[in-house]
Amino acid sequence: MLGTFGLFWTGSFAQQVPNAGELCLFVFAATAAFAVGYALTIRRPVRPVVATARNTRAQDSRRVRQLVVAGGIYYIVLGVALLGEYGATSPGSIWASIQDPAQAYANKFTVYQAQQDTGRTNAAIQVLTLLGVLGTVLVPVLVIHWRRLTTGVRLVGIAGIGTYSLFFLYIGTLKGLGDFVLMTAGGLLIASSVGWDRTRQRTRRRRATVMVAVGAALFCGYMVNSQADRVVWFGTQDRVQASPVVERMVGPHLANGVAAVVHYPTHGYLGLAYNLDTPFSWSHGMGSTPAVASYASQYLGVDSDRYPTYLQRTEERTGWPAGLYWATIYPWLASDLTFPGAILFMVFLGWFFARTWRESVVSKRLLPTLIFVQLVLLVGYIPANNQLGMSRPGMIGFVTLLVLYLAVATPRRPGGAFVREALASTSSHSHHTTTTNQMSR
């Protein structure tokens, strides 16, 4: 969280910050609030977890396989539907777009505009949107339980990830690929932290670190090439300002790509600086979660322009484009919570992040694991936006997980005990009992 902020000050946008002191104070306060919430939770004693019976473990193993298959099929169907919606007609057309990511990126906005102008909808995508919770399952379950899965189940999961990734490659967009990298990292973090053999844990963590590093390197390599093409296509060389040293090493084209990659996760702090100088005006729940605002506008007839967000009002005041450039997660939250309220929210986020992490490692239950990986996405996108509230499938998936989590946590409610039995656990190979001392090690 502070790494991207430090990197921001090395770029050209740092010179445009109108309120450096206020910006630093806010970012440090928000990050400290997250750390406080995390520390208060992670230091609490851990309740013992009793080993899972053999027959229950067998049922859980079967459930894991079913979840991977369901998630894989979901991503396959969704990827195919999106490819068709965005104009893919053959493998040749997909390959042509992949070879020219800048053109592909520009073409997707043509599809956006056509959808808005004609009001066109896709029934299959609408149904899949409501099943967004399946999109939260595949990657973490596949990663954590890889060794327990049959070859066929693994292939279904990989096919789902590949098909959905193919769609993002087709439209020249990085978002879906970055999501998979972050979710894989979250799953590997959990997988490498379970077990009681410290030597084995260290080996798993080294292996997980290597896997994440390789995945991140491949993603960054594609990102450099894609961003370099975008710089040429959109004529933004003056904005990214490639380093002369890097340019001498790799040439002007790739140097622009490297500069754009550095600019990509950091420029939102300039947008945040502008937003901090914009007066507060409550957006009536329409500002912090764009997916909710889109539903309210489409189905309830709410005119969202009556309740402009921080980002929209800052664009009117400064010209910083709300829909094109980032401004970090904080103005989204502040549109409904105020900036002091956004800092308090970070305390809660740190608390919940630590809670789901502990439950994922200690109890190995499914729901905390899935929620923790989703929170990894949220934290990873803090320099950009409120990622879990940006898209309808993402928001629906996360809200579904939260509802199920609360139902499991409160078995006295009608149906709570059934949900606890059906969804609470994914399996444990260990016959030991987790103790506070074991967790502290």
Image (cartoon, rainbow, N blue to C red):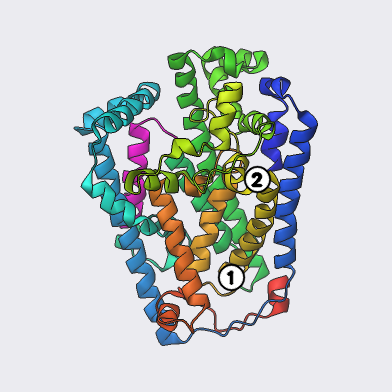
The rendered magenta stretch, by its main secondary structure, is classed as: helix
Which region of the structure is painted magenta?
Answer: 156-174
Q: Position of residue 339 (x, y in %)?
A: 68, 44
Q: Which residue is pictured at 24% across the width and 44% down the height? A: 81
Q: Which residue is pictured at 38% across the width and 26% down the height? A: 105
Sequence-earlier tag: 1 or 2: 2
Residue 373 falls inside the magenta stretch: no
- State the residue in front, 414 or 178: 414
In the image, residue 437 above or below residue 218: below
Q: Are marks 1 and 2 in contact (CB under 8 Å)?
A: no
In the image, residue 297 above or below residue 8: below
- Label 1 residue SS: helix
Q: Which residue is mark 1?
A: 359
Q: Which residue is pictured at 29% across the width and 44% down the height? A: 79
- State the residue in front, 318 or 429: 318
Relative to 208, is 346 on the left or the right? Answer: right
For residue 298, what is the image quadrant? top left
What is the crowding at mark 2: few (fewer than 14 residues within 10 Å), some, or many (at least 20)?
some
Q: Position of residue 377 (x, y in %)?
A: 53, 49
- The answer, for residue 239, to whether it is visible in the render is yes
Q: Amino acid at mark 1?
A: Glu
Q: Position of residue 433 (x, y in %)?
A: 61, 83
Q: Which residue is mark 2?
A: 338
- Label 2 residue SS: helix
Q: Position of residue 76 (x, y in %)?
A: 28, 50
What is the crowding at mark 1: few (fewer than 14 residues within 10 Å), some, or many (at least 20)?
some
Quarter the N terminus occupies: top right
Q: Which residue is pictured at 35% across the width and 68% down the height? A: 65
